[in-house]
Amino acid sequence: MQRTTQPVDIERIQTFMAVRRAARPARRAAFSLALPLVAFLLVAFVAPILYLLVTAVDNPETQSVLPRTLAALEGWDGTSTPDEPVFAALAADLKQAKEDSTAALVGKRLNYEIPGMRSKMLAASRMAAGLETGPYREKFLEQGGIWADPATWAVIQRNGAGLTPYYLMTAVDLKQAPTGGIERVAPDQAIFLPVLGRTLLVAGMVTALTLILGYPVAYVLTIAPKTIAAVMMLMVLLPLWTSLLVRTTAWVVLLQSDGVINSVLMALHLTTEKIQLIFTRVGTVTAMTHIQLPFTILPIYSVMRAIQPTQLRAARSLGAGPTSAFWRIYAPQTLPGVVAGCLMTFILSLGYYITPALVGGPQDQMVSNFIAVYINRDLNWGLAAALGVVLLLVTLAIYGLFLRLVGADKIKLG
Amino acid sequence: MASMQTGTHAGGRSSDALVRFTQVKKSYDGIHYVVKDLNLDVAKGEFLTMLGPSGSGKTTTLMMLGGFERPTLGQIMLDGKPVERLPPEKRNIGFVFQNYALFPHMTVAENVGFPLRYRGIKGEAAREKVARALGRVSLEAMGDRRPAQLSGGQQQRVALARALVFEPSLVLMDEPLGALDKQLRERMQIEIKHLQTSLGITMVYVTHDQSEALTMSDRIAVFHDGRIQQLADPKTLYNAPENRFVAGFIGENNTMPCTLVGHENGLAVVRMADGSILKSAGAAQASAGGDLSLSVRPENIAQADGQPAPGTNLFSGTVTEVFFLGDHLRLSVTAFAGQAVTARIPVSAARGFKPGETVHLSCNAADCRLLEG
């Protein structure tokens, strides 16, 4: 073939290499500019999410505190009270646990699944520390029926695995039946699905309200004279420049029973008695709507600004009345902004914490508030992480749904 | 106005006017008038162009006719009925906008079919009309495309088809060719003109491009400073501008200050700045005493040779610059004591000019105009 017989054009290759060499510092400089952000994202975003995912299924307590017991349980039939060797192993484990002060750790973990297990475990470890020789079985059985119950041993055995679905299942109100299957928790014990539903409902209400209030504002912003538009834009942006906590606290003041809103309503004789606003759903949604308005308005505004004013004029000249021209010509073209704004507000609203905590009542606490409770008060990080995972999955699912419904090209965030 | 009677479609206050502006004024702030005392008739079947620089009031006039602006004072009649308060959708006027204003979320066919929806035309009848309208602008195959998938010229045609599909008697166009390149613009000018004559539509066209106006129009209204400066057919406008603005705006013109000294054989006799005497047509409009200018187009200035015919002005000047432009030379000359004069000399008639040398030039008195100001 001719091509193979052609002499290699050294000069061209050298030129090519020279060009690449010359461009290298620029490429390196460009990459190194992005490097700090990449590093920051890895440390501050990717790593915590991975940690969250791991924490939601991590289950080290039983494995590390009761290794001998777990080994002895391997031959257990699962339906009767275990025999002496298992109790001997448990006594050995607990003796060690007493020395290491780890009995409370495994007690707390098992207590999630067997109420009262924490104190039983502590008592048993104290007893085991005083025992020199067996037989251990009777001693433990004297401590209480819980040690005779095969269900207790089933839970211990199940938690011998390093990973557990327990937290994730709890986060969606499921539990493991004694038979090993998965079942719903009793309706009166179901907490998290109602909380998730409430979170979605509040986020939906806030999104709808910001859209209803924000859409006309965005429109006026696009048609107002420059000076007026600038002032309006300032008013839209002002909440963004104020601390979330300050704004929420301001709402707490306003919504008080003796607060400004009630005083004004009564002064205007619109009501004869004080209305309960603070610690209600109305208060929560009002405060959240105020905070979220800019997030809905700005994407809509940026899309509206790109729509030529002649679009409406053209529609009118062709025979459409003002209403028809708006719905058929203008509104469809604002859709990318509406979707982007609503998506932003909805997703941000799903994660609200401070506002429901300060302005809302017990019935307005959202998933985030429960996450905070499990992290700060109950120190149940596994469940907190599991709730976080559920929230993350719901958010991703909604984002995916939006994408599917309107298409990725229909979402315009800037 | 004298020139109104010279138009191919005599305007005046005839009864066949489709559009009639009577003493229309428009002000946005109550202090400045964008349109000052506008009186204008547009005859049925006429192609009338409103020509002028930006801010001259031409677009505001068009918008008032389209129903997007309301006149501050005065009356607009459409087909014998006052329409100042009629919203645009009730006027049945086709409108082609500068940026086409095609609806990006609809296909070409949906765009063109849009006005039919409001006229109760549905189904097969609508499809037929859309197909015919698209055929008229040679876009039959493009019905399923989105406007963004079309070239600028094609988008322009869609806008045209959309404005014509409901068979309006009047079509307004606001600089519709402004975004196209020169070649395409010239082709579209001819296409639009063909459509207008073959369909017998009345068209009011706004542009700031004088060659576009000259190519397409039956009559041209030159706007400046909120007023019509001159309303005439293209030929009259070009050959007999009535004032300095029109003379300067339409084509190129040398305007040179002068004073009127008398009349001779229907021609005005004027004295130039350097004292030389020239003759000019258009004396009727000139009143002695006021500031006057002599106006002559560069192509009407020739190189003086041999014995001049009677009624020919002769003058000389110093060449400052010479440009070669293919078919002609563009000669910049200083004459009449410092006055810059431009002449277009056909290459065939030109000899080698050099900057600094003295040339003798001539222009026919009939090609000169005497203008006020």
Image (cartoon, coloured by chain):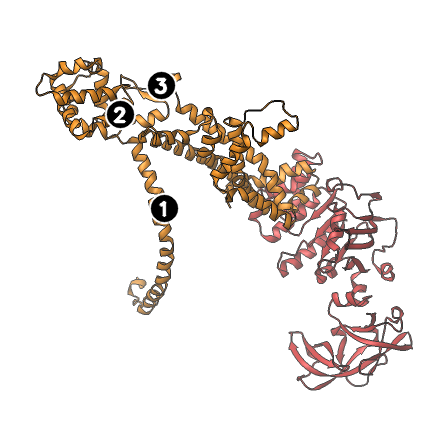
Chain colours: A orange, B red
* Quarter where residue A14 is shown: bottom left
Circle 1 residues within 10 Å: few <14, some 14–19, many ≥20:
few
**Which amino acid type corresponds to the residue marked 2 in the rendered image?**
Lys
Q: Position of residue B290 (x, y in %)?
A: 86, 72
Q: CA distance from mark 3 to mark 1?
A: 39 Å
Can residue B217 be seen at all in this image of the molecule? yes
Q: Position of residue A304 (x, y in %)?
A: 59, 44
Mark drawn on residue B253:
none
* Residue holding disc 1: A41
- Whether residue A345 sits left or right of residue A267 in the image: it is left
**Which amino acid type corresponds to the residue marked 1 in the rendered image?**
Leu
- Mark 2 element type: helix
Can residue A412 be seen at all in this image of the molecule? no
Q: Nearer the viewer, residue B279 or B53?
A: B53
**Which amino acid type corresponds to the residue marked 3 in the rendered image?**
Val
- Mark 1 element type: helix
- Whether residue A286 sits left or right of residue B31 in the image: it is left
Q: Nearer the viewer, residue B142 or A316?
A: A316
Mark drawn on residue A108:
2
- Mark 3 element type: loop
Mark toward the start of the polypeptide (2 vs 3):
2
Circle 2 residues within 10 Å: few <14, some 14–19, many ≥20:
many
* Residue holding disc 3: A185
> Nearer the observer, disc 2 or disc 1?
2
In the image, residue B87 above or below residue B192? above
Mark toward the start of the polypeptide (3 vs 1):
1
